[in-house]
Amino acid sequence: MPLGSNTRNRVSSLALLCFAFLVSDAARGQLSGLQLFSESRPAMGTTFTIYLYSSSRPTADAAFEAAFDEIERIEEALSNYREGSELSRINRLAGREKVTTDPEVFNLLQTSFDYSRKSDGAFDISVGPLMRAWGFFRKNGKYPTRAELERARSRTGWTKMNLDSQQRTVSFAVPGMELDMGGIGKGYAVDRVIDLLREAGVKSALVDAGSSTLYALGAPPGKDGWKVVVPRPGDRTHAISEVLLRDNSLSTSGSYEKFFRLNGRTYCHIMDPRTGEPVQGMLQTTVIAPTGTATDALSTTMFVMGPAAGEKLLESMPNTSAIWITSDTKKPHIEQWRWPGRFCPADDGCEATGEENSKQ
Amino acid sequence: MNRREFLGGAAALAASTLAEQSAAMMPASNRVNLAIIGPGSRGQQLMRTFLRVPGVRFAALCDIYEPRWDQARKITGESTRAFKDYRELLSAKDIDAIIVSTPLSLHSEHVIAALDSGHHVYGEKSMALTVPECGQMRAAVKKSGKHYQIGLQYHYAPWYREAMRLITSGKVGQVTQIYAYWHRNNSWRRPVPNNDPKLERLFNWRLYREFSGGLVAELGSHHINFANEVFGGIPESVVGSGGVDFWKDGRETADNVQVTYRYPGGKTLFFSAITTNRFEGCQVQVCGTGGSIVLTEADGTYYYEPKTGASAVPEGLAVEHGVVTGASYRAELPYRGQGQPLKVPEGTQGNPDFLACNSFVDSVRNNQPTKADEEVAWNCGVTVALGNYAIDHDARVKFSDHVRG
């Protein structure tokens, strides 16, 4: 597709490491007789990996099939790389007329708009034209001409889109606009998979969308949660923090994998929709929140807003926390907000003892 | 005017001219109230897709498994009326059309009841489990005067329509064979909540013969429908094989099937579905004397025919100089040249599911015949049913012994 790569490069190489701490006997007994299974498949422009505890391989296989079918269903709705997707239909028609869509897609558009409103446009699913102008659509970037940039800016902006909740329609005020769900779609898919696994009776699972968005359902037997290691930007061998997830989600956005350099400046692929230019001075953000949809959207939003403005926004959102890593990779400067995990020593980080989860 | 006259014969199969723009421009006030019997996984996807058509609302739903009610209500976004007994749903007065998305063995009962109660019907494929049931359904549609559309969405896929246009225009010469595959590498099993054995057949009905036509019905019907269209009707005979050979988990429907249908003039459809290797994926290869077309779930590609042509040779070359002898062998490797993507005409792009659903709503709203109508459905339904009959009886099955067109 890829759903994620337009808005940010989701740390597929960040090596978020997942494993768990030993704790209670009670928890161990509750889930006894279960085995851990995992399966990875390409989807949404990255690799999804699902870990789950199950009583047997066939039961696990059935859950995997249903889960990956669900991810495929959502990609078929939200991809802007597939001509037949619902999002592509909206993008083709909404510049000319009001397009009716189904409640699921409409609600996700509305959720996206809510993040745009709350962040004063730091989160914006209309950045597609900007991504193209800066050469980040399927490519590694280029500096746009002034004309290209002006044209892209005129076609970008969440306030130029109209959502009619009564009619369930979406329309664009300006022709040539293009929605891109890359900043929220994978997180949404993770949430739907978690719903599906819950309905199937799964009590413990970790759903990992390219290592950039994860959701932990319950905890592994005998553990308090699924352990996630947040590595240094661009250096998967050193951890910055470790955190336990249990019935919540974590997302990371990073600037160091898809970028270009020009005249001594680095231009990453994460756009500040308010300026029309790539975000400067930010290396990585990681957000924890109750849902994958929220962390997916908020990790990009925090990347664009930075710690000062970002903390003000997070104050209004219960059960959210974040870390920002700024400066360069040699001396990363860390800011945190209600971060529940432990930070690793600056010299050599936490010990990397888990299974590396990166697929690229 | 009866329904057959209304259809205008072959015009019903003409290439889709439906543009998604017409859907977007439809006034939302022109409401069409739908109801669904069987909002399982496929039914829920149909609900989402129908709700992308302007003016569509789900007025009611029916499922014997009550947890589906809330799942379906999440999709409609409202507290849609729900019934456990489909007969109560059919007695509702405010419903224009019914979607039947139940297990295959229940299609005939539900579709015929919906037609008899005065509703148009969108019925999931395949038409019915048996040949007699397919006949009963076709008769019921004609008697009712209502519109019926079979859920063969690729009948509306723009690249399938373009392929038919190329085939009809002679671009690939004479089509002699179609090779079709739906190869997967999974158990084809759905998760059952908490592994509750009481729910096994409800969730995994596709694996049990009392409900299901297995891989031929659930996967092959799309390919079979296309072959019927290309070859102009149903086959004359079929041989088949298959069995539960890998996933020995209590299922009754084969985990791999191979059926070979012979059409008039010796034209052939070979269809294979397996669950242990996905190299071929889902595709249809149309083999013509002048070229090939490969169709997938997302696109189509035309390949020129790389056969060696017979051309005139100067006598001096072969006769006077003589021909050189020696050991020779030329491997007949698969053609590896680049194909030419099928170009979908401007204004006809779109998702097959959406185009199929939109077309059905259009038929209901404007009292127009459906394209994938009861004739298309019957052709495909009996071809599927007799393919399974051939597998079950390990025999060559003549269609003329079982059906009368």
Image: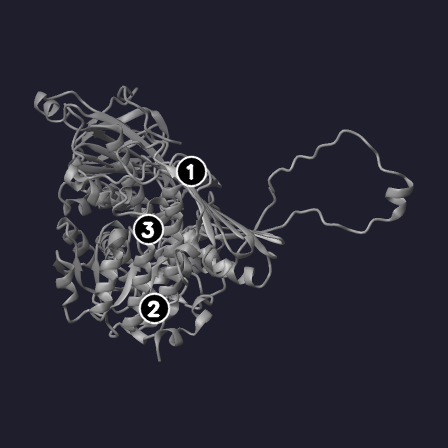
Q: Secondary structure at mark 1?
A: loop
Q: Quadrant of residue B156?
A: bottom left
Same chain check for tags 2 and 3? no
Give the letter of the chain under mark 1: B
Residue pictured at 29% horizontal, 71% vertical: B143
Q: Confirm or deny contact between disc 2 and disc 1 (CB under 8 A).
A: no
Q: Secondary structure at mark 3?
A: helix
Give the letter of the chain under mark 2: B
Look at discs 3 and 1 and give the one toward the viewer.
1
Q: Is residue A116 visible?
A: no
Q: Position of residue A344 (x, y in %)?
A: 24, 23
Is residue A159 placed above or below B393 in the rendered structure?
below
**Residue on which disc 3 sits:** A181
Please tell me which residue lies in front, A256 or B319: B319
Q: Amino acid at mark 1?
A: Arg
Look at discs 2 and 1 and give the one toward the viewer.
1
Q: Position of residue B295 (x, y in %)?
A: 48, 51
Please tell me which residue lies in front, B288 or A239: B288
Q: Is residue A342 visible?
A: yes
Is residue A323 placed above or below A294 in the rendered structure?
above
Look at discs 2 and 3 and give the one toward the viewer.
2
Q: Confirm or deny contact between disc 3 and disc 1 (CB under 8 A).
A: no
Same chain check for tags 3 and 1? no
Q: Confirm or deny contact between disc 2 and disc 3 (CB under 8 A).
A: no
Same chain check for tags 2 and 1? yes
**Residue on which disc 2 sits:** B24
Please tell me which residue lies in front, A285 or B277: B277
**Residue on which disc 1 sits:** B278
Q: Amino acid at mark 2?
A: Ala
